[in-house]
Amino acid sequence: KQLDAPADKPANIDMPLGLISFVADVGTPGVTETFSLFVDHSIPVNGYFKKNAAGDWVNIATSVVDLYSKTRVDFAITDGGEFDSDGQADGIITDPGALGFQAPMLSYSVLIFVESTANAAPSPPAAPLR
């Protein structure tokens, strides 16, 4: 079942298909089941996002693979575990989650080059960086 994207989703995660909700009968209580979702390659996704126990959205995808005109997103959920929405180890996994795209965090590096001034006149001290 497809639902609207949640109002509290982080601004840096795009959920182009909204939430996807399903119930899976996995038979054995407490088992971990792997799921695969396929979407058209034109839809940008790089993960499967769920809320953790603290209420933070996390990417639980174990792999994201391009297959011809489709993108396959794999993830695992443990029955009764943190990402099983009903919280019961009862052989049934209840899941609302979202295929999404989270832009990578940018990081910056600063390189400092030191030039030898062995024969040069002394320089005044540098001003502190602010």
Image (spheres, rainbow, N blue to C red):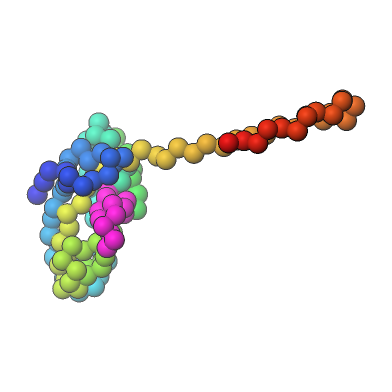
126 above or below 64? above
Residue 91: x and y in percent read: 16, 71
Quadrant containing the C terminus is: top right
Picture quadrant where residue 14 is located: top left
- The spot of residue 84 in percent (x, y) is 21, 63
Q: Residue at x 24, y 34 (%)?
A: 43
Give the residue drawn at x 49%, y 39%. 107
Above or below, 126 against 35 in this view is above
Q: What stretch of residues is rendered in magenta?
A: 48-60
Please identify the quarter of the rendering in which residue 69 is found: top left
- Residue 96 position, x and y percent, is 17, 54
**Is 39 above or below relative to 80?**
above
Residue toward you, 110 or 5: 110
Tell whether 123 sits left or right of 61: right
At x 13% / y 53%, what residue is drawn? 21
**Residue 32 visible within the image:** yes
Residue 71: image quadrant is: top left
Number of numbered discs overlaid on the protein picture:
0
- The residue closer to the viewer here, 65 or 75, is 75
Percent of width and height locating residue 110? 60, 35
Q: Could one spot residue 71 in this view of the protein?
A: no
Look at the image and say whether residue 52 sits in the magenta stretch.
Answer: yes
Q: Is residue 59 magenta?
A: yes
Q: Is residue 37 left or right of residue 60?
A: left
- Along the line of sight, the residue nearer the viewer: 36 or 10: 10
Q: Is residue 38 above or below residue 124?
A: below
Name the residue at 45% across, 37% down.
106
Residue found at the far right of this picture: 119
